[in-house]
Amino acid sequence: MAIIWPYPASVSSYVAAGRQIEVPPQRCPACQRQLVGWGGYWRWVRAPLVVERIWIRRGRCAGCRRTHALVPDLALLRRLDVVTVIGTALVLKVIDGVGLRPIAEQLDVPHTTLRTWWQRFRTRSLLLLSTCTRLVVALDGTPVDVRGVGEQAALEVLSLAWQRAAARFGLRIGGGTMWAFWSWISGGLALGTHTTSPWAAIPGADWMRASPSPGGPDP
Ligand SMILES: [Zn+2]
């Protein structure tokens, strides 16, 4: 299983850190014990002007002995491209109505790759919409007024959830980009193939119950 953690800096600084990349302490999603370092592995990442390998640390739980890949929220699992590039493509398609081929050229990604992102996003957009609606309501208890439909509505509510999470919890969550937030709430599987919902058990969902910011509304 993978744990997505918020990485506060740029892709190039992650690349530059190499195997020295520092990951904040993480807890086992199954039993909440703190993980200990358990090696890691290289994976490729593609960003504008960057195609590099990055070091993904692993953590192991002393209790249940499971190991977890500790993946920065700048990426999704099993997707080469950084999440901001994927997100930019989705906004161009959904909000600006640009065709897939021009987007592929503009972002310099293969057309087939882009088509896969789009198909996966469409398939999962209803799930994204319902998850983010739940999140928004859990965050501040106010109802959600969505104006768009379909994929537009999904992006609209994702944006709302990210803004409210950032407003309430500050840089600890959603301090990067909306797309990093998207990676995080999906456990890196925002464009996964699984038919079961990775959103069902939102990794780190305990932040909704624990330590609301001073002066913030109660859940
Ligand atoms: Zn464990």
Image (cartoon, rainbow, N blue to C red):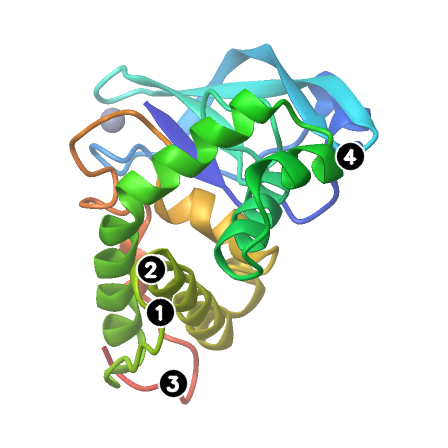
Compute the Cα span from label 1 to label 2: 7 Å
Mark closest to the chain's N terminus, 4 or 1: 4
Q: Which mark is residue 187?
A: none
Residue under label 1: 211
Does the beta carbon at disc 4 come under 8 Å from ligand 1? no
Q: Percent position (x, y) of residue 133?
A: 26, 67
> Is disc 4 surrounded by few (<14), some (14 to 19) or many (20+) residues within 10 Å?
few
Residue under label 4: 48
| Mark 1 in CB contact with mark 2 (< 8 angstroms) | yes
* Occupied quadrant, residue 122: top left
In this rendering, position of residue 99 left or right of residue 109: left
Which of the two marks, 1 or 3, is nearer to us in this view? 3
Q: Amino acid at mark 2?
A: Trp
Question: Hey, which residue is sitting farthest bottom in the picture?
Answer: 215
| Mark 1 in CB contact with mark 3 (< 8 angstroms) | no
Q: Amino acid at mark 3?
A: Gly
| Mark 2 in CB contact with mark 4 (< 8 angstroms) | no
Does the beta carbon at disc 3 come under 8 Å from ligand 1? no
Residue under label 3: 216
Image quadrant containing the N terminus: top left
